[in-house]
Image: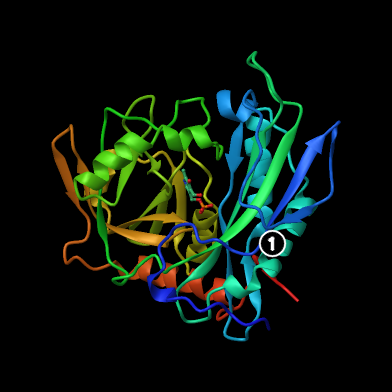
Amino acid sequence: MEKTVNMDWAHIPFGYVKTDYNVRCTFKNGEWGPIEVTDSERVDVHMAATCLHYGQEIFEGQKAFRGKDGKIRIFRINDNAERIQRSANGILMQPMPIEKFREMAIKVVKLNERFIPPYGSGASLYIRPLEIGMSAQVGVSPATEYLFIMFVTPVGPYFKEGFKPTKVAIYRDYDRAAPCGTGRWKVGGNYAASLTAGDLAHKNGYSAVLYLDPKEKKYIDECGPANFFAIKGNKYITPKSGSILPSITNMSLQQIAKDMGLEIECRPMHVEELAEIDEAAECGTAAVAAPISEVDDVEAGKKYVISKDGNPGPVTTKLYNHLRAIQLGDEEDKHGWVTVLD
Ligand SMILES: Cc1ncc(COP(=O)(O)O)c(C=O)c1O
């Protein structure tokens, strides 16, 4: 195994750290070219490219881990590959073939092996695939040329002070997505739309915004960069909505919950149900599951206290530990989610 770089793994932020290489692929003249390896962090983009004017930008987020056995594991590559294909089709960009996406992910991880945090550090290697429209165009129409890049960056443990619940806010004056819009895809513009409310939440001591459905403002949608689930008795309840991103972590947690004997309810979830649940959490690649202590419906002047003692609930804790154990190779990968690299 290549020697690991020397870093303070427990304290690195969820930010960008320069690694050795990134991989790229260009779609031109109707076909994807070969995978190229570069150490450049720069992209040369035409000033009239569609990504700069009409938001033709999509991305993904996934992780690689070092196991106790020293092996490298990438979590659910195919699901991210399929999701970015849906995002591409959603805003008329060129979809990257699944096999090529897999090849790029494996290559970029192996090329930067020395940046994969050691087992037990709580840190991991974040993989960021992205695609942009490159053709110079002034009229509003899709590009004919695309650039697909994958880079990696080591990220620290999400819970630096321990696995503790945090407060989230509902701001009824803001939406991140429209009812039949792009919320279901991982499109850069959705994140631009979430910045103001996210900033407001952070300034007021909340970890995230919990968005309601943009049509009726009655049902829970999701958090800025994560899905939402609640535990009520023996039930795992998660919102069904056309304006949320289908989270791969949420799908995995639902499966684990099912395996644990819980009943899964994926349905519209009225905001007032927050008064009757036992546990709630945000879920996504960054944190796996981040427990929620309280939801403040700010403009409505309502507060839902979920964790009465300030501790994470037992079911959320169990789900969190189980999924992390699968990612690290400590628990059997019964559903074939993990790609172990040779
Ligand atoms: C809007 C949004 N919802 C949910 C998620 C969680 O998805 P995943 O579990 O695939 O990381 C993310 C992060 O990717 C996100 O950006």
Cβ(mark 1) to ligand 1 < 8 Å?
A: no
Image x and y of residue 113, in percent: 65, 72
Task: Check the image and report above or below for 103 versus 220.
Answer: below
Q: Is residue 322 above or below residue 140?
A: below
Image quarter hosting the C terminus: bottom right
Q: Tell me which corner region of the image, top left, top right, bottom left or bottom right, holds residue 106.
A: bottom right
The residue most toward the bottom is 69
Instruction: Examine the rendering and report whether any part of residue 311 can be seen.
Output: yes
Q: Residue furthest left?
A: 301
In front of the other: 205 or 312: 205
Disc count in the image? 1
For residue 55, say whether it is visible: no
**Amino acid type, callout 1:** Val
245 relative to 108 in the view: left or right: left
What kind of element bears circle 1? helix
Examine the image and state in which quarter residue 130 appears. Answer: top right
- On the image, numbered disc 1 is attached to which residue? 108
Judging depth in this view, the residue of 57 and 235 nearest the camera is 57
Structural crowding at the residue carrying mark 1, measured as other residues with C-alpha within 10 Å and reported as few (<14), some (14–19) or many (≥20): many
Instruction: Examine the rendered structure and indicate whether residue 65 appears above or below residue 193.
Output: below
Q: Please tell me which residue lies in front, 82 or 272.
A: 82
List the single residue furthest toward the top: 139
